[in-house]
């Protein structure tokens, strides 16, 4: 998209999410210029905002640009859309009342372009009659105001007032900008994706786990959903926000993950991205194990083998998904081990990745796709790019779901090939 957004960053703990928003918009080809309010600068720095946007950060109402034009006029009219994120109670009040005593409020008053505001504030501030009155006035004036999320807040209270997730705000921005129709070539497809680590309890406070962040699995689930697939994400413990537009089942152990996957069937595609623990403690202590009870020789830990989820799904006699994909995280002889795993597990594809570096928890991945048709070695790219490319391959491989327009899928495939 050749579009430009003026982003006004208000003051609030949620201001840090504006950095993710800039990155997400850039990935869609949307250029962002920014106004950072004085309060906003208490939470994010001009350096971080400018580094992500690639543009100067504007803060001073009376600063002239290089051509000597008034900054608030030029900024407010050069964009295709003005976005306020987070929109504080103060910014909502200023915009509703037509106040103009700083760069942000003056730009909002001077603009002749559409405005979108994403509120974030304490629950009682959001529910206060004055704020609700200001929101009603702004909506009557034609401003798009997103509903805040409900949940726990930094202040310790619970209720409406949380800033929506950045990807939800980005989607709303793209809708306002008139984004082209999204590829819905997987509409009707049912997919189950596992992501993150599992935790196998040793006692009341300790567990066996690994360094998986869940980022790759979450990115794949999101990419499938954006193509129209009906996605169930079975997630081990992560710090990631649940992706929108899908069912998310939170689990802890390998046994819980297998149960959740089986309950999610039938499905057309199963992608086992989760780093499932191969072993679990044979017994779990009811309380916390004490060092003094382990003796001078240390603690002997007996392990039991966990269920092999990928092997189990691959060998289902009834209800096996049309396409079963596994991941092979290795530190050496990556392709050799992955090829052996492909044969041993009975799945259709294996995604091999070298995790000896910063892949687990990192933002990028370098993978090799192994399947009966051969081997594909992909360049190092972001995990979101890996997800998009993998979903392209899935779209080419699966049979259109019942009722899917095959000609639409063919046109989409041809478009991807030509690009």
Image (spheres, rainbow, N blue to C red):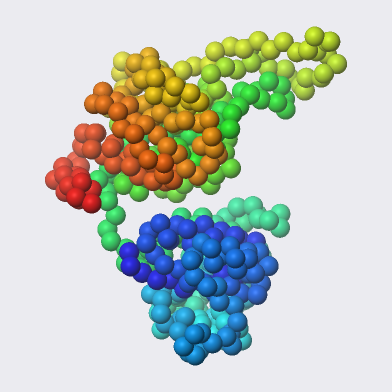
Point out residue 397 in the picture as x, y percentages from the top left corner: 24, 34
Determine which quarter of the picture holds residue 112.
bottom left
Residue lying at 41% horizontally and 76% vertically, measured from the top left: 79
- The answer to which quarter of the image holds residue 131 is bottom right
Residue situated in front as seen by the camera: 372 or 140 = 372
Q: Residue furthest right?
A: 292
Please say if 291 is above or below 122: above
Please indicate whether residue 373 sits to the left or right of residue 267 in the image: left
Where is residue 336 drawn, in percent x and y? 39, 20
Q: Count the marks: how many? A: 0
Looking at the picture, tell me which residue is in the foreground, 172 or 380: 380
Residue 99 in percent (x, y) is at 58, 86
Residue drawn at x 23%, y 38% is 396
Give above or below for 306 relative to 205: above
State the residue at coordinates (51%, 61%).
52
How far across and how far down the image is residue 226, in percent? 35, 48
Left or right? Give the position of 13 relative to 367. right
Quadrant, the N terminus: bottom left
Q: Nearer the viewer, residue 99 or 259?
A: 99
Question: Residue at point 48% right, 34% down?
Answer: 195
Q: Is residue 224 visible?
A: no
- Residue situated furthest left in the rendering: 407
Q: Does residue 369 appear in the picture of this structure?
A: yes
């Amino acid at each position: 998209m050749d579009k430009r957004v003026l982003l006004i960053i208000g003051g609030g703990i949620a201001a840090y999410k504006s950095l993710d928003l800039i990155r997400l918009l850039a990935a869609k080809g949307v250029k962002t210029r920014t106004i950072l309010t004085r309060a906003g600068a208490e939470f994010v720095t001009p350096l971080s905002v400018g580094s992500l946007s690639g543009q100067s950060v504007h803060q001073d109402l009376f600063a002239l640009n290089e051509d000597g034009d008034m900054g608030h006029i030029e900024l407010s009219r050069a964009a295709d859309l003005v976005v306020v994120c987070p929109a504080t109670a103060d910014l909502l009040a200023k915009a509703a009342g037509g106040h103009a005593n700083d760069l942000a409020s003056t730009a909002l008053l001077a603009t002749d372009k559409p405005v979108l505001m994403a509120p974030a504030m304490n629950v009682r501030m959001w529910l206060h009659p004055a704020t609700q009155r200001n929101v009603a006035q702004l909506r009557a004036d034609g401003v798009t105001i997103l509903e805040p999320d409900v949940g726990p807040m930094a202040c310790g209270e619970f209720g409406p007032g949380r800033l929506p997730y950045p990807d939800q705000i980005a989607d709303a921005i793209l809708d306002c900008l008139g984004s082209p129709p999204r590829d819905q070539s997987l509409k009707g497809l049912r997919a189950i994706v596992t992501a993150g680590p599992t935790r196998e309890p040793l006692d009341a406070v300790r567990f066996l786990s690994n360094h998986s962040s869940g980022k790759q699995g979450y990115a794949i689930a999101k990419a499938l959903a954006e193509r129209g697939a009906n996605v169930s994400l079975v997630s081990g413990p992560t710090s990631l926000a649940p992706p929108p537009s899908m069912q998310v089942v939170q689990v802890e152990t390998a046994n819980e993950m297998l149960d959740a996957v089986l309950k999610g069937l039938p499905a057309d595609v199963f992608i086992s991205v989760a780093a499932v623990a191969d072993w679990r403690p044979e017994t779990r202590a009811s309380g916390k194990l004490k060092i003094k009870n382990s003796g001078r020789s240390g603690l002997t830990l007996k392990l039991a083998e966990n269920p092999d989820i990928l092997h189990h799904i691959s060998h289902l006699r009834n209800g096996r998904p049309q396409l079963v994909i596994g991941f092979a995280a290795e530190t050496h002889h990556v392709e050799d081990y992955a090829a052996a795993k492909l044969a041993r597990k009975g799945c259709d594809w294996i995604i091999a990745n070298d995790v000896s570096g910063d892949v687990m928890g990192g933002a990028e991945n370098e993978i090799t796709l192994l399947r009966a048709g051969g081997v594909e070695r992909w360049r190092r790219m972001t995990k979101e790019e890996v997800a998009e490319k993998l979903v392209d391959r899935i779209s080419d491989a699966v049979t259109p779901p019942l009722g899917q327009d095959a000609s639409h899928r063919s046109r989409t495939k041809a478009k991807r090939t030509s690009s």
